[in-house]
Image: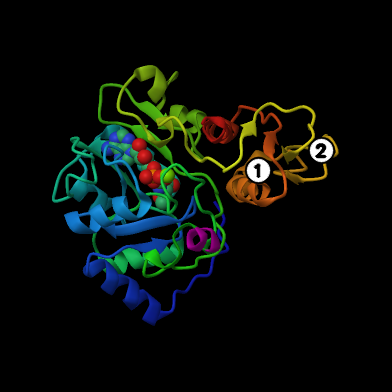
Amino acid sequence: MSHSYPQDVDSALQEKAINLWQQGKCVAIPTETVYGLGADARNPSAVAGIYAVKSRPRFNPLIVHVADTATAQRYAEWNDRAETLSRFWPGPLTMVLRKRGDICDLVSAGGDTIGIRIPAHPLTRRLLHAFDGPIAAPSANRSGRISPTTAAHVLSEFGDSIPLIIDGGPCQVGLESTVVDLSGEHPVLLRPGAITRTMLEEALAEQGIASGANAGILKSPGQLESHYAPEKPLRLNAKTVEAGEGLLAFGPNAPAAEYCINLSERGDLAEAATRLFAALRSLDAMPVERLAAMPVPDEGIGEAINDRLQRAATR
Ligand code: TXA
Ligand code: MG
């Protein structure tokens, strides 16, 4: 994966972030996927603060972010599949493993597993190294709303109710990490993302990895019914545009529309993923009554795009 983020976080800013974390406060941080709202995963009142700011239901567990694999192994029971999939770290993959160490129960929503990942954004990796501890960070949006892919999105979600937002530029992946549960007998894909089903199957040499919905086990974010939701209703599989609609287009053959954002005119799925959430926010703010999304191929990261679109359309 290529990165062109700001490489340096001002050292005064870094110190401020670390101090806030040590005091049990939240800091919004950039990652390669989406912006996160981070706090010390060992501190129950800090973690309670995340749930409060987001209005997040307490049964929905948080992902723990660490600087390196050695730290991950301190908080998660390692196994062969985790070892294999750690080749995707730092990167947009969260592994669900049996929990160990002093992560507080609120992070795992009372369960005995933990979702853990090493994010790839250089600025946040530097912060994690300096903090030298586990940071619980859900996406930095109010619960159920569209995930933020810029610092400005985070500001528009929370305003002054969080003390610090670290601006690391626009997120390069643009969709939340793939979540794969490795705590049971078989791996289960709980949330599709940029590390695709095919990539997981090839790395593990296992075909037909089940999805969370099919496996009927603990649910991942998006399995809450409505998620990633714009304010206005969203119609899927649009081939034409109706009066009053803003069009979320994909590919070179989009119908003409007065209000339209094309996710990728050349039909590139990775480009579409990067732009999806910002496009939903922009269309939502246009003078339209409803949104309509063209079909996106369900291959590679297209599976993750369609997952988010389906949830955005559910009300
Ligand atoms: O890309 C991402 O993963 C971003 C950035 C900030 O890292 N974070 C993110 O967090 O998307 P969040 O909270 O919006 O979504 C994480 C989802 C949770 O909603 C939860 O369902 C699932 O991951 N998850 C976390 N821990 C889990 C666990 N122990 N078992 C099953 N699912 C878990
Ligand atoms: Mg989220």
Query: Which of the 4 image quadrants contains residue 204?
Result: top left
Labelled disc at residue 272: 1
* 131 left or right, relative to 191: left
Q: Main secondary structure of the magenta part?
A: helix
Answer with mark 2 or mark 1, whichever residue precedes in sequence. Answer: 2
* 203 left or right, relative to 270: left
- Between 85 and 290, the one lying in front of the other is 290
Question: How many badges with numbers are in the image?
Answer: 2
Q: Where is residue 228 drawn, in percent x and y? A: 51, 41
**Crowd around label 1: few <14 · some 14–19 · many ≥20 (10 Å):** many
CA distance separating discs 2 and 1: 13 Å
Whether residue 163 is visible here, answered yes or no, is yes
Look at the numbered disc 1 and give the secondary structure of its residue: helix
Query: Which of the 4 image quadrants contains residue 160?
Result: bottom left
Above or below, comparing residue 167 to residue 135 in the picture: below
Look at the numbered disc 2 and give the secondary structure of its residue: loop
What residue sits 26% from the left and 21% below the top? 185
Give the extent of the magenta segment: 152-156
What residue sits 17% from the left and 44% below the top? 105
Q: Where is residue 272 drawn, in percent x and y? A: 65, 43
Labelled disc at residue 252: 2
Q: Where is residue 161 drawn, in percent x and y? A: 38, 64
The amino acid beneath tag 1 is: Ala
What residue sits 39% from the left and 70% below the top? 164
Above or below, comparing residue 125 to residue 218 in the picture: below
The amino acid beneath tag 2 is: Pro
- Asked if the magenta segment contains residue 164, the reply would be no
